Image (spheres, grey):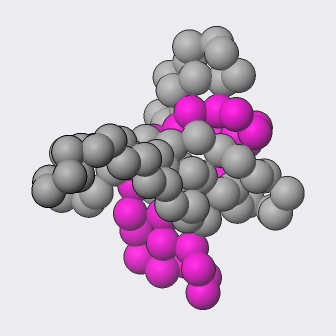
Amino acid sequence: MNKRRRLTGVVTSNKMMKTVVVEISRTYRHPLYKKVVHSSKRVKAHDTLGCQIGDEVVIVESRPLSREKRWVVEAILKREGKPVVEIQDTAGEGV
């Protein structure tokens, strides 16, 4: 394993070529007020596996691929409710 960050999220858009938008949700308790806070952020990720909307994916950080893309889809955990694990072989691509 390498030291790159890996995050899990849900694909919300796949309208671009070889790019998907992944929404990463995080739930935590506020340190002072003890209220449960839900936060989410959307990032663009390079996709060579053919992700569909609703897929749960693992993304890994990479070098800048375009102005906004700094993540690559590494694996698909669930396909629209079906458990699947597809891992991308990034050794030969240089990404």
Residue 26 in percent (x, y) is at 38, 46
Label total for image? 0
Front-lying residue, 2 or 67? 67
Residue at point 76% right, 52% down? 13
Q: Identify the residue at the far top of this view.
A: 82
Taking the view exactly as shown, the residue that stands out farthest to the front is: 33
Q: On the rendered structure, is 88 left or right of 63?
A: right
Rendered image quadrant of residue 45: bottom right
Question: Would residue 4 appear left or right of 73 to someone viewing this image?
Answer: left
Residue 53 in which image quadrant: top right
Asked if residue 48 shows in the view, the reply is no
Residue found farthest to the left: 32
Say which of 11 and 3 sits in front.
11
Q: Quadrant of the N terminus?
A: top left
Q: Is residue 41 visible?
A: yes
Residue 36, position as x, y percentages in the image:
32, 41
- Farthest residue in the right direction? 15
The boundaries of the magenta stretch are 45-71
Relative vertical location of residue 95 with respect to residue 58 in this rendering, above or below: below
Residue drawn at point x = 56 percent, y = 33 percent:
56
Q: Residue at x 58, y 23 (%)?
A: 78
In the image, residue 58 lies in the stretch drawn in magenta? yes
Quarter of the rendering containing residue 55 = top right
Q: Position of residue 87 (x, y in %)?
A: 47, 34
Q: Is residue 65 magenta?
A: yes
Which residue is located at x 57 percent, y 61 percent? Answer: 42
Is residue 52 shown above or below 73? above
Name the spot of residue 51 as percent of width and height, x first: 70, 40
